[in-house]
Image: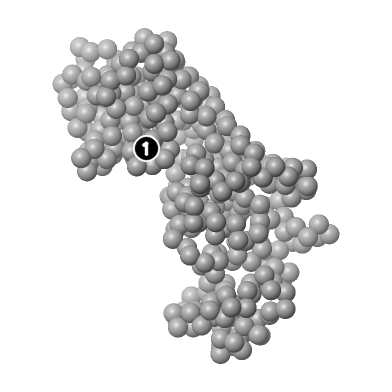
Amino acid sequence: MNPDANIRIVAEKAGVSTAAVSRVLNKKPNVSEAMKSKVIKACSELDYRLNPNIQDLIRKGRSGMTGNFAYIIVGSDISSPLYSKSLDGMEKAVAALNCNISLAKLSGLEKDIYELPPLLRDGRADGFLLTGALNEKIVSLLKKCGKPIVILGTYNNAVYCDLPRIALDFDSSLFKIICELKNAGKTRIAFFDDDPASYVDINALGFYKKAMAGNGLGFDEKFVISGRESGLNRSESLKKVFSLDILPFDSIITLNYASAILASHLIFANAERYERQPEVLLATFWSFSYYPLPVPTIYFDFMFEAAASKGISILEDILSGKDSNQMQKIELTTQILNFSK
């Protein structure tokens, strides 16, 4: 950020009014693309951003901190149960610190800092918690904001960009889930692969295979149900399998609660067809805010709430100078709740 640049200099360089610059940078409506282009070009050349000292959301004190953290979700639906659980954890953590948490959603296609929301671009948050459909480019762009970042989720090392991260220990988590199913008498355990192209699902599938072997159970390719099989979507893939008169499996793991809802309804709807077969047991992620599924289910907690709370603590430690380890990695393991209906 150029300390010598101000909104008047930007306006002069762009050939517009200071009010026009303010409208563009605050993402106000009724701004033409031509004006937006002029202002962003001038800002970029001058390396100018809005002064956080004059923004309504800034609560600067002696520490120079705003008292705000940003939870950034990239390219994903905010309504996902995973993110709502994370928000619960963050809310408790920031309340204890007498701070605030603000939500920002990005498409993941942003190319420069001026396409970011003012919350992120103009220093209105002290640190970022980042998750969603991350890629190396969007993480690198957010690093240009000059704020500490903690990544929540499992990604490849290139995406992490040497930033602190909190991820799920899929290895031990899948082992525990399959062990629980085995203890319930299930040996033909299927795995629903929501999106075979995603890094998370690729890793989870690999650890599922390893966990099956670790529990003394053989792996069979027919136990893996793909959400993108031959172009079929999640719903069609599950319907195709549960329309069979005889199921090749006696239990099924799905890491996505939306998929679990669909699978449970298909199991329930086809109960008469399966009455001569062993009861199908479902294993899925759970939150107490969701309704119990209508079939026997083993629930597990991915610890998203704890992960998000820990993420806030890491940001606070970095900002206070207590922790300078920018590359630390914390892996959380799944907790089995195991209250089957």
Q: Residue, x 57% and y 30% (percent of image)?
A: 332
Q: Amino acid at mark 1?
A: Ala
Asked whether residue 291 is in view, the answer is: no
List the single residue furthest toward the left: 245
- Answer above or below: position of 110 versus 38: above
Left or right relative to 222: residue 163: right
Q: How many marks?
A: 1
Q: State the image quarter where residue 326 is shown.
A: top right
Q: Residue, x 55% and y 42% (percent of image)?
A: 152
Q: Residue, x 38% and y 42% (percent of image)?
A: 198
Left or right relative to 48: residue 210: left
Q: For numbered disc 1, what is the local secondary structure?
A: helix
Q: State the image quarter where residue 239 is shown.
A: top left
- Give how far across and how far down residue 151 sits, in percent: 57, 45
- Give how far across and how far down residue 261 sits, in percent: 35, 33
Q: Residue, x 73% and y 45% (percent of image)?
A: 324
Asked whether residue 270 is in view, the answer is: yes
Residue designated by label 1: 258
Classify mark 1: residues with Cα within 10 Å, few (<14), some (14-19) or many (20+): some
Left or right relative to 202: residue 176: right
- Give how far across and how far down residue 86 sits, in percent: 55, 41
Q: State the image quarter where residue 15 is shown.
A: bottom right
- Answer above or below: position of 135 versus 305: below
Q: Nearer the viewer, residue 192 or 172?
A: 172
- Give how far across and how far down residue 293 sits, in percent: 37, 28
Q: Nearer the viewer, residue 90 or 107?
A: 107
Quadrant in which the C terminus is drawn = top left
Quadrant in which the N terminus is drawn = bottom right
